[in-house]
Image: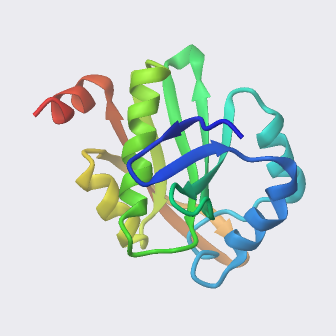
Amino acid sequence: MDSLFESEHLIIRPAIKEEIHWIMALEQKDENKNFVFQGSYEDHLNEIQEASTDLCIIEEKNTHNSIGYFIGAYDESNDSYEFRRFVMDFKGKGYGTEVTNALMKYAFGTLRVNRFWLDVFTYNTKGIHIYEKLGLQRDGIVREGYKDGDVYKSYYLYSILKDEYETINSL
């Protein structure tokens, strides 16, 4: 299957319908479920079919093993790209940074967006560290804006603009 883009160690390609159950199982793993929204089969099928949405599988180049996925959405009318959801099966290898950096390069270079943005739960310190390390700025907080069962969760909004991205990556 053709890749959407590649990084040093990873291939990022569109997901197919047959991978939805694997994606859902990854979302529901104990180490992931408190950090991401749990999509239904129909949610993920719609993401595969929607032209402006990227539901992508992340594979290791050497093994071609699937090691994660992300969902992103290109908003052509506002020249922005939303990094909606990101789950890695293997943590601590630097792949989170590599995927995020490669996705920003794709969004700013190939899609020519002006703004790349995301939200992240306030307690997701590893994700926050990655995003800040790559130059994203905290735009604000949505207090208790997400209800998970009986628990209300707050999340931060982060973004980076094209000129900021280009300045950081030209150094």
Which quarter of the figure is the N terminus placed in? top right
Q: Residue lying farthest front?
A: 62
Q: Position of residue 146 (x, y in %)?
A: 62, 61
Q: Would you say 11 lies left or right of 27 here?
A: left
Camera sees residue 37: yes
Q: Would you say 74 lies left or right of 45 here?
A: left
Q: Position of residue 83 (x, y in %)?
A: 52, 44
| Residue 170, image quadrant | top left
| Residue 87, image quadrant | bottom right
Residue located at (62% from left, 64% from top): 65
Colour convention: rainbow
> Is 101 above or below relative to 122?
above
Residue located at (66% from left, 36% from top): 2
Q: Position of residue 36 (x, y in %)?
A: 61, 65
Depth check: 171 or 85 in front? 171
> Is 95 above or below relative to 16?
below
Depth check: 60 or 87 in front? 60
Residue located at (42% from left, 60% from top): 96
Which quarter of the figure is the C terminus placed in? top left
Q: Residue lying farthest top?
A: 77
Q: Would you say 6 lies left or right of 92 here?
A: right
Report the number of discs.
0
Q: Would you say 76 lies left or right of 19 here?
A: left
Depth check: 113 or 146 in front? 113
Q: Residue lying farthest left?
A: 171
Camera sees residue 141: no
> Is 23 above or below relative to 98?
below
Residue located at (43% from left, 70% from top): 124
